[in-house]
Image (spheres, rainbow, N blue to C red):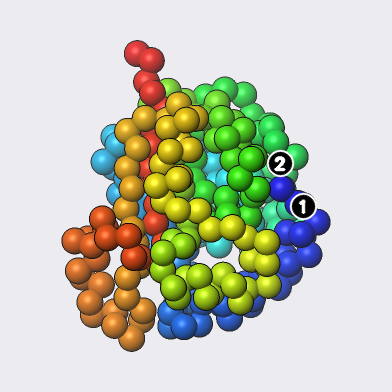
Amino acid sequence: MDQAEFDRFADEYRDVHARSIHLSGESPDFFAEYKIRDVARLVAQAGLRHPLRIMDFGAGVGNSVPFFTEYLPNARLTCVDVSRRSLEIAETRFRSMAAYQVFDGNTLPFPEASFDLAFTACVFHHIPAPEHGGLFAEIHRVLRPGGLFVIFEHNPRNPLTVRAVNTCPFDEHAVLIDAKVMQACLAAAAFTDIQLAYRIFFPRVLRALRILEPMLRRLPLGAQYYVSARKADVR
């Protein structure tokens, strides 16, 4: 993971991101909020206890932080990133809402079983594929037994998503990851109960149709997808 590359875009990240998704008609906050709303639903379904200890892996400038506070208000959130500058911006924006921790891109600076939930959003397509396995193993290590991992990514089967990525400056070196490949990677990292759902099928102009999206989650055409998985509970 290249800290310098992420530092370079940190100050303009929000503006660049907004321009890259303009065809959706939505703001970056829309995309950040729907993810955390989904996570809160998955947490409830998994029966995780409160207060939750949450790691936002690749938190960047903190776009998800206020929505964690809204949807999981009793959680203790730790934002982790290789980009010191991004975390400085996140802390300036949301100082009291989370802890902020730089890491070296390889080893998470936490003991085993530190978190109940690990979350990452559109991060792994920036990371070279040979590094994925080691990072998934690290995330697995710092989750408690029975803990939940939720990973969101862009869907390479959606043409508007591909266009947005191809025209976004900070996605210059991105390699999109097929959802089935992601499932296999998590299985190889010893995660269990692996579930896949495709998300965001309609732009804002067709938002009235979003009521149909729960019925479309198996259709591999959504703009993004999530994979959720558990660390096996040894009890």
Q: Quadrant of the C terminus?
A: top left
* Residue on which disc 1 sits: 3
Farthest top residue in view: 235
Question: Would you place residue 21 above or below residue 222 in this image?
Answer: below
Q: Is residue 225 left or right of residue 47?
A: right
Instruction: State the residue at coordinates (75%, 40%).
Output: 104
**Residue 73 drawn at (x, y percent):** 42, 49
Question: What is the number of the mark on residue 105?
Answer: 2
**Residue 174 drawn at (x, y percent):** 62, 60
Instruction: State the residue at coordinates (46%, 62%).
Output: 156
- Amino acid at dot 2: Gly
Viewer-side residue, 94 vs 151: 151
- Amino acid at dot 1: Gln
Quadrant hosting residue 24: bottom left
* Marks 2 and 1 in Cβ contact (< 8 Å): yes
Instruction: State the residue at coordinates (57%, 35%).
Output: 133
Residue count near mark 2 (Cα–Cα under 10 Å), binned few <14, some 14–19, many ≥20: some
